[in-house]
Amino acid sequence: MVAVRREIRFLLNDTEVRLADVAATDTLLNHFRLAQRLTGTKEGCAEGDCGACTVLVGRRAKGTMTYEPVNACIRLLASVDLCHVVTVEHLARGGTLAPVQQAMVSHHGSQCGFCTPGIVMSLHALWLARPDPTVEEVETALQGNLCRCTGYRPIIDAARNVSGDPATDPLMVEGPRIAALLDALDDDARVELGRGGSRAILPAEVDDLAEVLASEPDATVVAGMTDVGLWVTKAMRDISPAVFVGHLEELREVAVSDAGLTIGAGATYADAAPAMAQMFPHLAAYWNRIGGWQVRNMGTIGGNIANGSPIGDTPPVLIALGTTLTLRKGQERRVMPLEDFFLDYGKQDRQPGEFVESVHVARPAAGSLHAAYKISKRRDEDISALACGIAVMLEGDCVREARIAFGGMAATPRRAAQAEAALIGQVWSEAAVETAKTALTEDFAPISDWRAGAEYRMKVARNLLTRFWLESRGETSQLDRGAA
Amino acid sequence: MMEGPAPTSEGRLHDPVAHDSAHKHVAGTAVYIDDMVEPTGTLHACLGLAERAHAEIVAMDLSAVAEAQGVVAVLTAADIPGANDVSPTGKNDDPVFAEGAVEFHGQPIFAVIGETREAARRAVSRAVIGYRDLPHVTDVSDALERVLPHVTEPLTLSRGDIAAALAAAPRRLDGRMRIGGQDHFYLEGQIAMAVPGEDDDVLVHSSTQHPSEVQHMVAHVLGVPSNAVTVEVRRMGGAFGGKETQGNLFAAVAAVAAKRLGRPVKIRPDRDDDMVATGKRHDFLVDYAVGYDDDGRIHAVDAQFAARCGFSADLSGPVTDRALFHADNAYYYPAVRLASRPMKTNTVSNTAFRGFGGPQGVIAAERIIAEIAHALGRDPLEIRKANFYGEPGRDVTPYHQTVEDNILPRLISELETSAGYHERRAEIVAENARGGVIRRGIALTPVKFGISFTATWYNQAGALVHVYRDGSVHLNHGGTEMGQGLFTKVAQVAADCFGIPLDRVKITATTTGKVPNTSATAASSGSDLNGMAAQDACEQIRRRLTAFAAEKWAVPEDEVVFEPGAVRVGAERIAFPDLIEAAYMARVHLSAAGFYKTPGIHWDRAAGKGKPFFYFAYGAAVSEVRIDTLTGEYIVDRVDILHDVGRSLNPAIDRGQVEGGFIQGMGWLTTEELWWDDAGRLRTHAPSTYKIPLASDVPRVFNVTLAEWSENPARTIRRSKAVGEPPLMLAASVLEALSMAAGSCGPHFPHLDPPATPEAVLMACERARGGP
Ligand SMILES: Cc1cc2nc3c(=O)[nH]c(=O)nc-3n(C[C@H](O)[C@H](O)[C@H](O)COP(=O)(O)OP(=O)(O)OC[C@H]3O[C@@H](n4cnc5c(N)ncnc54)[C@H](O)[C@@H]3O)c2cc1C
Ligand code: FES
Ligand code: FES
């Protein structure tokens, strides 16, 4: 039996906080603004999309701390157990602005100022990691921060002209001390909290998770909260009992082997990014278009699959790569091709008490061609109108195997069986691609909504095969932002 | 990317002084209404919104709402002590709470007052409301077809015999253009907090651009005189026109609840409710016929501007008027008829948004130019130049105001050169001719924007200045700070008047108790009006000080000079605080109320004639884009702007307005799409679905220059020009560049209507090829 602790413990700026009276749905942002009266952090949307609520969450790593920007509005309070939470109030120590703040003032980076604390936090995190960032790195760091006033130019300038050395930043200097403080608070216990019947459970480890879920089969698994957080803030849904998994380091492992890549369900997009980009270079740019930086620091691969959304970005590209999914219930595991998990709209092949444990992606075969495309109204931090993963294995001139998967074209992420069939056995040629394009109309009957019309979805789905063909001939057509 | 000027410490006029709150913004210490310490016992309100686009309310059972945990009260129309109306133009068509029927999906019907915001929000969904559906219309073209009423009186501007001129013109084109609306997406949503006082009194903290109107509306809804209501706002987290009238309802609800319950009440709608229940930029449907000749010179324009106004008038009258005032943009139309059709629809009532209808007029004008250029196979810039306002005979607008200050020829020629327009265009045309998946486009578009409220009486402002015994200055005026840097600029003016450092001027919250009957901070007029009013107040005090010093030190008055750092009296230099202390001891009045009204403007709406604008602000932009013709995706690669702000009061702040306005305009014309479903529900009502520009949408090359040589010929505050709205319209260049790129796919005109989403761009490529 694991020990049970009935409070969460964390550091908020320079204060140790212990809370027992926590509902599953309490958000970090409300905790700052209402309970602690730390009002520097703003609410602009309460759905993770504007970044006004950006704060840093620090986790222990190798004896010191690493800090990531996250959205406090959808980050549930219970999930920061044993973390160091840093708000804008903690940057200007002793009244002296931190270098990023000073740069923002010097470059006229604020107008109404409402987005500014969040922007400062994202840029502070960027500066800690990259003191001398490129424009592209700044843009990537700001994908999750909206500013309606400035047009961003002065903010980008500020980000590129921060003086000082991050090594002397208080957060870096104090890292080992903070880590030690958190170590002292850590008792390896399961945490069980509640208020007014709303319960939150943080299992001690993955086996404990299996046990908790076996006894609470109807519990809500809470990973990165980039979906669940919105159920709370927008739909005001009750998620109790909520079983948090984001803190389970074991579940976040990304293991590279000769066979391929095994990614724990709790790995965030950011956790998985380096290994993904290394083994599948075609995914590097695509990956950075999932959410914004804050969302990539929170959202998990497991959550992106388990939510069963027809417009999640990882399923189509993972399906194209032949990914398998491991589900676990108690000590039992099931392994299935990822596409089989998606039964219908809102319906997945997951039993009560079962959770997604990991995915496995095999190393790509030599001679295979790959692509990943995301089409959205706005380039960054937007949900796909459609997303597409393609893998074509050639034998000589001929297509031996083809895997083409789409999101946004049907009620689930799905393979284009007819289009694949049209290619297999054919000479890899424009003519074969044309046949596959025609076949796509048999595979899908997309819908019209606010992200795109049906006609556009179908037209583009077909054109993406053309794009893929052109790319296979070395003619690249994808737009990039280019150099400044 | 170009570096902006660094802020200076003295803070002199015309220096790039940092925003007065910049330090607080970055430190998170700037206080917005939701950050204020709540008085003990503060309650929280949440609105119950209609779930039908148009229906009769046949039953309403709110008992479950009232019984929900943490609920203190439920308010409906029956609980309003005064008028159930917040119509800003006195039309009585804008209820606080719908009564009997609902006219759009998302219309407020009731409010829950709870111990916490969460309790109030949770309770709302327990309402049981029975509706009987009525036919609804959300789209402008449907409204036209079904001949729905106008929400307000339409306007026609005309000159000459339009039918004859069209018939006589060598060439003619007819077209229709749809122009999308836009949500403000101020980062700080609507919010109000009302604190009840004794008798009828109530103090309302409201995130508003128009405290006086909120004051009058709250009084109207409470049924008390205006002197019982005080409205205060220190700063807004963005507004853009969205807080000109749209804050009224929230303030009224908070005030009614506060007075009824005797406790402070705060209302801060969730972002989704805010976007569903508050008005936006008007969508337009423009039908036009143009007569022109082989040189591309326009002979006649006959155009109808139909707008989706929503269920009530709000500001749709002046907004649709301003669309007509700008339907010429910078071009002379010899014969012209421009008619507005402010259409009623079952959608939220549309409202002010940066440019106030002007941008839609400008976009239509630029479309007409592009279509002529396409028909003649010419560079659109040549057509633009052929039609600019010019010499007498070609210098009168459709509203019969003479354009006397046109600086576009110089502005455009400088920009053409600095941006290398012609070389770049030639290269792009050649490259597009080679074909390929990626196509490029480039466009140079001008803007001419009329400055002044067209409601002439709005062009007045007041200020209140106190000088305290230590020489520190308390500055107050009727303008509001929404991020545009108004407070900084006006403080610079005040500091300059007295020759004191900027940090001796205390900028204070706008409040109806200090300066009464103010106009909205809108129409780009903030600095023009309030800067002048503040200057008037400072000059009154300065005159008293001058007279006092002349007498005391026995020098002629013209030897008393307020220099930076000290006051020179004859041969002596006296520190400002010392002069003030001496003046106080001599019983000189050290406080003054300043006033200003814009001279020389008039407007006869019935006749469609007058001089509604004090002057024009000008600018021009060149934008270059690439599009992917397989998907319609695009990138704006480079933008060069040359903009006229007259003699800038603060070039850093002005540049910020130009850049921010441009990017906001680009968002409007590209990725920002309002999408209603068949049930009349707005489905793009949060940042997850409504996409404003991100840092990664900003052109990597973004050269913004202020025309330093420009000085306002009109007698404005230090010869500066208004800057809030005009730059937004520079984004027309992005739309036109996208249109050129799409148009390169085939021989046909691409008819790319905004918003030019990737989908719209792909469809425009198809149209260029001859598709539907
Ligand atoms: C601002 C923003 C931008 C976004 N952009 C994108 C985008 O570009 N592309 C995209 O694909 N998505 C995007 N999303 C959606 C979101 O990131 C994903 O759906 C995300 O992957 C969900 O993962 P999570 O860890 O946050 O899951 P949670 O929200 O914690 O959970 C989601 C669902 O999965 C279940 N779940 C989670 N983990 C497990 C597990 N291990 N076993 C069983 N069930 C589990 C939960 O019970 C819940 O039903 C965005 C979201 C936001 C807020
Ligand atoms: S408040 Fe908008 S992201 Fe959190
Ligand atoms: S400064 Fe206003 S939103 Fe960024």
Image: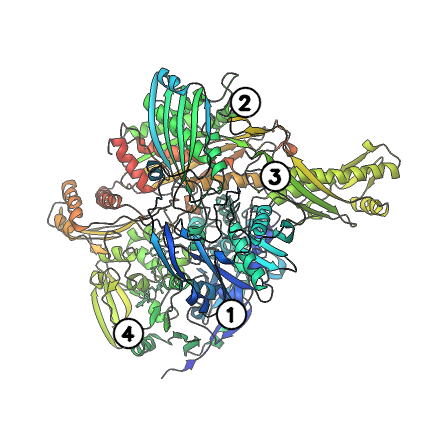
Q: Residue at x 34, y 21 (%)?
A: B172
Disc 4 packing (10 Å; few <14; some 14–19; many ≥20): many
Mark 2: is the Cβ under 8 angstroms from ligand 3? no
SS for dot 2:
loop
Q: Quadrant of ligand 1?
A: bottom left
Task: Name the amino acid type tagged 3.
Answer: Ser
Residue under label 3:
B527
The chain carrying label 1 is A
Q: Can residue B572 be seen by looking at this rendering? A: no
Residue under label 2:
B402
Tell me the number on the disc at residue A353.
4
Task: Name the amino acid type tagged 2.
Answer: Thr
Q: Position of residue A393 (x, y in %)?
A: 17, 52
Task: Name the amino acid type tagged 1.
Answer: Leu
Mark 3 vs mark 4, CA separation in Å: 63 Å
Task: Give the mark nearest the N terminus, 2 or 3.
Answer: 2
The answer to whether A340 appears left or right of B476 in the picture is left
The chain carrying label 2 is B
Q: Position of residue A366 (x, y in %)?
A: 20, 54
Mark 1 vs mark 4, CA separation in Å: 32 Å
SS for dot 4:
loop
Residue under label 1:
A11
Q: Can residue B701 be seen by looking at this rendering? A: yes
